[in-house]
Image (cartoon, helix red, strand yellow):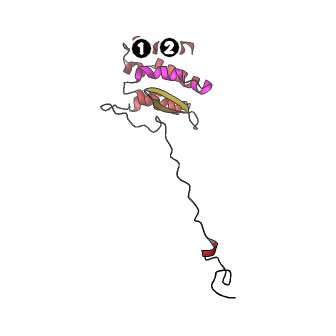
Amino acid sequence: MDQSKELINLLANEDLAKFLNIEKLVTSTEFSRMAEYAATHSVAHGDHSYIVKLLRPLTSSQYFYSAVGWFCSRAALEYADVKGVPTFTKSASAPNGSLKILDVIKAKPARLKSGTKPVSASAHAIVETKKPKKRLKKVDMLDSWARLPGSFGGGKRS
């Protein structure tokens, strides 16, 4: 695991990232080891910095949202893009330890179309809007059907 930590720190170097073939990097077994290390570290310690470092070279590639989706489901996280910086927060769901990143990457990579971001339900933070509470209908007892005949204001004598 110490080797994975060193490799993640090397990938964070922007000068080195220029020379990487992203497709070969993402489909390699070493990348899957690094991703697994980053996910387990995130679950154990709550530190998401290794995940952000791993995703940094992938930001402009078609594999970015697939990798983000895998990290979200594997480490039980929610993703948000705050001013161009990926931010992860802990979600209420449980981590899925059986999911492999190579299966997600090879299945169907997300495609970028002219600057638009693909929609992935597990990769984006879901904003829940609160519905307004239903108000109970206010009933005035003087105008109510529940008023007994002969009571005050009933118009009849008993």
Quadrant of the image containing the C terminus: bottom right
In the image, 4 versus 136, the foreground residue is: 136
Residue positioned 49% across, 16% down in the render? 8
Quadrant of the image containing the N terminus: top right
The residue under label 2 is 9
Is 53 in the magenta?
yes
Camera-near label (1 vs 2) is 1
Instruction: List x then y, in percent, for residue 20.
Output: 38, 15
Using the image, determine if residue 15 lies above or below residue 80: above
Instruction: List x then y, in percent, for residue 2.
Output: 57, 13
In the image, 29 versus 36, the foreground residue is: 36
In the image, 40 versus 57, the foreground residue is: 57
Residue reaching furthest to the left: 114
Crowd band around label 2 with a 10 angstrom C-alpha radius: few (<14), some (14–19), many (20+): few
Is 127 in the magenta?
no
Callout 1: helix, strand or loop? Answer: helix
Instruction: List x then y, in percent, for residue 36.
Output: 53, 23
Amino acid under disc 1: Glu
Residue positioned 50% across, 46% down in the render? 129
Choose top left, top right, bottom left or bottom right for residue 5.
Answer: top right
What range of the chain is rendered magenta?
Answer: 42-59
The residue under label 1 is 14
In the image, 89 versus 143, the foreground residue is: 143
Using the image, determine if residue 93 lies above or below residue 55: below
